[in-house]
Image (cartoon, rainbow, N blue to C red):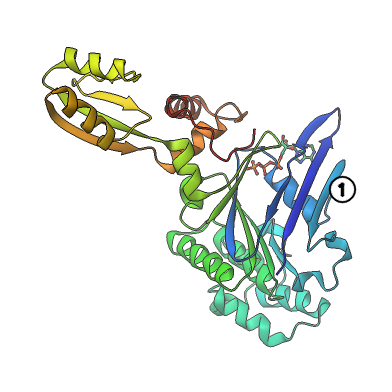
Amino acid sequence: MTRIDIQRLVKEYGRGHRALDGPTFSVLPGRVTGFLGPNGAGKSTTLRLLLGLDRPTSGTALVDGRPYRDLERPLCRVGALLDPQAAHGSRTGRDHLRILAATHRIPARRVDQVLAEAGLGAVSGRRVKTYSLGMRQRLGIAAALLGDPEVVLLDEPSNGLDPEGIIWIRQTVRRLAREGRTVLVSSHLMSETATFADHLIVLGRGRLLADTPVQDLLDSRGGSRAVVRTGDDEGFLNVLRAAGHRPVRDEEGRWSVDGTNAEDIGALLARAGVPVLELTERRASLEEAYLALTAGDTPYAAAGERQAAEAATPARDAAGTEGKTHR
Ligand SMILES: Nc1ncnc2c1ncn2[C@@H]1O[C@H](COP(=O)(O)OP(=O)(O)OP(=O)(O)O)[C@@H](O)[C@H]1O
């Protein structure tokens, strides 16, 4: 069972610009860990340091307790997709993989196996420069799986893939985790990551914002709220305020009560004899929970994204929970 351990990892680029500011976390086998964070959060830098492509300023990034460069036959321990453009354009897809395989004494039949798994069997004799972005992405994933590695690192694997390709990625990473491998998949899209990840590591501006099971992020950051329509607004407000709630009324006359649920509010109003015409419970989506978590750590957000992040923040505050996050 191979694990990844990142310990107080720091990477500075020129004039004190910290791409990584000391995150510490582990990636464990048998589950898919989604590696999330806004643009520039430090995800690719972490993966590059882990693969020995760059040196940390301080701290360590270890696979099975050792730096990547000390691993024997590293392709058979760690498979990685970092840059789908890495394959030489004038080689065929099959030749690209055959050359990689030869460096690690991997049998040629394994090349055809991963090409077929990646859906590239029919085009494996074509030069890579004729491949679409999605086909290159599939070739990069085939290369990552070539050595049947225990650890699989995929940087934004869905980039350029069509819907069928995205489903294939989802199924592939789930299968790899079921087989007991250690799977780390980076993305800046929470909605996509939620379809395959069991666990999340979230970075923001080079720092660790969360190291949490997906479900716990939802429970702790998202929170729930009760939405109520009543025939007695004044009585409703008196009861709710006395219980410490701060209901907010929408344009259609419905009251929204953060950080609670329908059952508790229903019981409270029933005891006070306040008539309830409508009572529902809304849970924040994982996307909202993620935006609330990363609000303030999104240096390159467009105005619309920033507003969405800010809109998501009060729900978190009202819920008053910090959960398992580590700021
Ligand atoms: N070679 C480099 N020289 C200088 N700065 C760099 C270099 N590589 C990365 N950075 C900076 O380090 C920070 C982290 O970048 P990184 O690519 O790791 O983020 P990321 O989370 O992978 O973002 P994205 O989702 O956009 O790929 C950014 O501010 C980036 O500009």
* Residue that appears at 68% across and 58% down: 85
Q: Amino acid at mark 1?
A: Arg
Q: Which residue is mark 1?
A: 55
**Where, quadrant-wise, is the N terminus in this rendering?**
bottom right
Please say if 251 is above or below 298.
above
* Residue 40 place in picture, x, y as percent: 67, 37
* Residue that appears at 35% across and 19% down: 244
Tell whether 5 sits left or right of 216: right
Question: Which image quarter has ligand 1?
Answer: top right
* Residue 313 place in picture, x, y as percent: 47, 26
* Residue 16 place in picture, x, y as percent: 84, 28
**Along the line of sight, which residue is nearer the eye, 28 or 104?**
28
Tell whether 13 sits left or right of 235: right
**Where, quadrant-wise, is the C terminus in this rendering?**
top right
* Residue that appears at 83% across and 55% down: 52
User: Is disc 1 surrounded by few (<14), some (14 to 19) or many (20+) residues within 10 Å?
Assistant: some
SS at badge 1: loop
Please say if 292 is above or below 230.
below
* Residue that appears at 64% across and 37% down: 326
- Choose top left, top right, bottom left or bottom right for residue 12: top right
Q: Is residue 189 visible?
A: yes
Please say if 4 is above or below 249.
below
- Choose top left, top right, bottom left or bottom right for residue 145: bottom right
- Choose top left, top right, bottom left or bottom right for residue 65: bottom right
Please say if 288 is above or below 118.
above
**Along the line of sight, which residue is nearer the eye, 203 or 156?**
203
